[in-house]
Amino acid sequence: MKKEHKACMSALLPVRDTLDVIGGKWKILILISIWEGNKHFREIERSIPKLSTKVLSKELKDMQANQLITRTVLNGFPVRTEYKPTAHSKTLKKVILELQDWGIKHRKQIFGDTSETDHSIRV
């Protein structure tokens, strides 16, 4: 492998790893929902339009495996499951805020959207 290719691959690998963990249509939205205080499955599901139960279940399992969230089963009647962000997930806040900022600027560039809605994410 040429020297330039090795340098390129070493630069691409961490980006690929990151995209494998937070990429896709739903993971960042689910993480934001949990950061915003939605702790239970149905709360998360209702907070994100068009997210199916099956997909949410799969994404939560993936996010738990990647240590972005914790899952706790609470005894009681009925038994409830609670999802919480990990300290590790909070290290993504800066990245997600940058994505959010870029998205706002892109929307303005493409659609001329000048709405001044507060878009800040709480962690």
Image: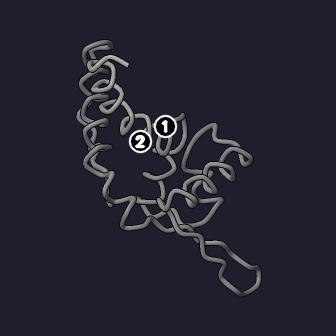
Using the image as rendered, state which of residue 80 and residue 21 is in the foreground. Answer: 21
Mark 1 Cα within 10 Å, few/some/many (few <14, many 20+)?
few
Q: Is residue 77 above or below residue 83?
A: below
Q: Residue at x 65, y 72 (%)?
A: 81
Q: Is residue 109 above or below residue 89?
A: above
Q: Quadrant of residue 80?
A: bottom right
- Secondary structure of residue under mark 1: loop
Q: Earlier in the sequence, mark 2 or mark 1?
A: 2
Q: Is residue 14 above or below residue 92?
A: above
Q: Position of residue 89 (x, y in %)?
A: 39, 58
Mark 2 Cα within 10 Å, few/some/many (few <14, many 20+)?
few
Q: Residue at x 39, y 35 (%)?
A: 13
Q: Which residue is mark 1?
A: 23
- Give the CA distance from mark 2 to mark 1: 7 Å
Q: Quadrant of residue 72?
A: bottom right
Residue 41 lies left or right of residue 10; in this view the side is right
Using the image as rendered, state which of residue 88 and residue 38 is in the foreground. Answer: 88
Specify the amino acid type for callout 1.
Answer: Gly
Query: How many numbered callouts?
Result: 2
> Which label number is shown at residue 18?
2
